[in-house]
Image (cartoon, rainbow, N blue to C red):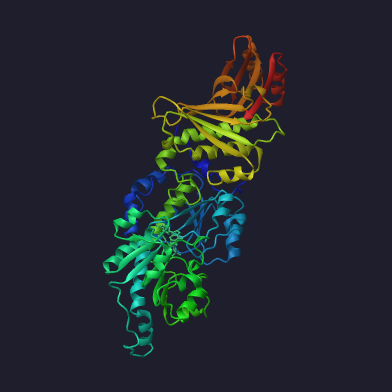
Amino acid sequence: MAAPLCHLLAAPPSTSPAAAPAGHLSPPSRASPLRRFLFARGVSAAPSARWVAAASASAAGGRPTVLVTEKLGEAGLELLRRFANVDCAYELTAEELRAKVSLVDALVVRSATRVTREVFEAARGRLRVVGRAGVGIDNVDLQAATEAGCLVVNAPTANTVAAAEHAIALLAAMSRNVAQADASLKAGRWQRNKYVGVSLVGKTLAIMGFGKVGSEVARRAKGLGMDIIAHDPYAPVDRARAIGVDLVSFDEAISTADFISLHMPLTPSTAKLFDDETFGNMKKGVRIVNVARGGVVDEDALLRALDNGTVSQAALDVFTEEPPPKDSKLVHHENVTVTPHLGASTSEAQEGVALEIAEAVLGALKGELAATAVNAPMVPAEVLSELSPYVVLAEKLGRLVVQLVAGGSGIKGVKIVYSSARDPDDLDTRVLRAMVTKGIIEPISSAFVNIVNADYVAKQRGLRISEERILLDGSPEIPIDSIQVHLANVESKFAGALSDEGDLRVDGEVKDGKPHLTLVGPFSVDVSLEGNLILCRQVDQPGIIGKVGSILGTMNVNVNFMSVGRTAPGKQAIMAIGVDEEPEKEALKLIGDIPSVEEFVFVKL
Ligand SMILES: NC(=O)C1=CN([C@@H]2O[C@H](COP(=O)(O)OP(=O)(O)OC[C@H]3O[C@@H](n4cnc5c(N)ncnc54)[C@H](O)[C@@H]3O)[C@@H](O)[C@H]2O)C=CC1
Ligand SMILES: O=C(O)C(=O)COP(=O)(O)O
């Protein structure tokens, strides 16, 4: 059974009635490495035929609604419109955005829309995906998104080249005063002596942040004859070496460079990294390009450094506040060249980004974990597909075990044990852990849990979840032999499920692609984990199965599965009975009244 994975990102049960169902598209193929490669090189590409065919095949049913708040490439919009209702509403005020967001399943933004905690609160649980059509996600409150169980995806590769080209354009324009000279000539002046520039060849360029954009800038600047050094605490030395770049310390980079180009993300640790002290340590007359984020620079400090000559020129594409104030001294400074956040704005990059984000958002809406997920584990599609029946099993075991807990006894510790012949490094259990958590928490709370917020919700509720592996001999072809879920130190309303160690324990396996319950406490059973389950403990003796069966039959309850397990002949036994409908209270009472039945419980799976 290729179980639908839509519940990994499922909307909360309280979703407004207008919410479109997730999971109505069949799984698209992921953008291939080739397409990403093409995008990254500015080659626009249509959505792959396989993607469209797969998505079209089952696009019947409700359509999700996607709100697009900034201009997106037409190819991406077209793709979104094929599978969703698309509302393009640009330049919304914060209030207008909050008003609209509760009516949509996905939101697609670029850098200008601030997706704040208030936006997630206003969404009231309906918003399932935020797609950032670009790289920087500093305008999205990721913590609030995670708490809301809303997946955030970005399009990290399609505008890399555009941003790198813009950095090079600014570097060259700045060093030759292109913008200033252009303005001067248009104003009727001919100032050849005033606009003598500086050469790039033989100068040292320090690239701060040697990621995708930084390394593309390095490649291009090498072609201009510059000596490149880079600072990036997290970049692999080999990758830098492969393009002939030395990774150096922050202090060495800023103190030796003639030009500095910024390419790190805006995070709490990079905010205002370039302050008075940093500028003070730079080589006198340094030139700075910023195509990353305005917030990594203390703009007042930069202004002081420009005024006192420490920095002789700056070229800025990005600003702390966008657009910057009209009277910004930095923008109007004669040694500053500015562009209005144009790094990603080439037609090729915008088409690529739009397609990349449309695919990611549509995929996420039907429950697929996007490869570009920013606030959820990135689980490759093949792994996810292989684990899909175990995902269902994990959730069902969680739902079952929690319903065996006696009211009032708090749950603190959950242990999940995976028995597998596969090397632990080849078994990614994050999705399974999330689903056990979902199964345990949802029946006992109003919280809704998905792959995005599972760990967060568990932590909030003081639930410690630990995982163990039992390495089996056997075929590593099968990812998991069985999953055990233990709740430590709880009281149970079905004492038969308590293990010898006093834990509440249930085990399950996937058989023929279906989740099966295989152990309840010390009792082996074999019952399909579907619909509803009655667990009944009795003294092992003839006739009980018939009695229970006939009560259910009389009450018109269809038994779909039944299994009996016992500790030893004539001793304790349990019956696990799968039923389609929820039996009337009357039927349950009659079962409880059978003399040899010691305890029983009805569980909704
Ligand atoms: N102006 C524009 O239109 C565009 C701006 N950008 C911005 O450019 C920046 C880089 O983008 P990508 O290269 O795609 O991201 P990336 O994630 O590939 O690279 C960022 C690099 O910065 C490094 N880094 C993190 N903290 C650092 C620190 N304290 N010091 C030095 N390096 C640090 C990371 O290790 C990583 O290698 C982002 O801020 C992004 O938002 C990207 C595209 C367009
Ligand atoms: O991708 C990025 O990080 C960018 O800064 C591009 O921003 P934009 O999509 O052009 O608003």
- Left or right side of 470 for 566: right
User: 546 or 599, which lies in front?
Assistant: 599
Which image quadrant: the N terminus?
A: top left
Q: Is residue 450 above or below residue 44?
A: above
Residue drawn 31% across and 72% down?
203
Q: Position of residue 153 (x, y in %)?
A: 47, 53
Q: Does the image show residue 45?
A: no
184 vs 7: above or below: below
Q: Is residue 61 visible?
A: yes
Q: Residue at x 47, y 33 (%)?
A: 389
Q: Residue at x 60, y 33 (%)?
A: 399
* Residue 556 place in picture, x, y as percent: 64, 22
- Ligand 1 resides in the quarter of the picture at bottom left
Q: Position of residue 34 (x, y in %)?
A: 31, 51
The residue closer to the viewer here, 254 or 407, is: 254
**The one of 392 and 233 positioned closer to us in this rendering:** 233
Q: Position of residue 508 (x, y in %)?
A: 53, 27
Name the quarter where the C terminus is drawn: top right
How many numbered marks, from 0 up?
0
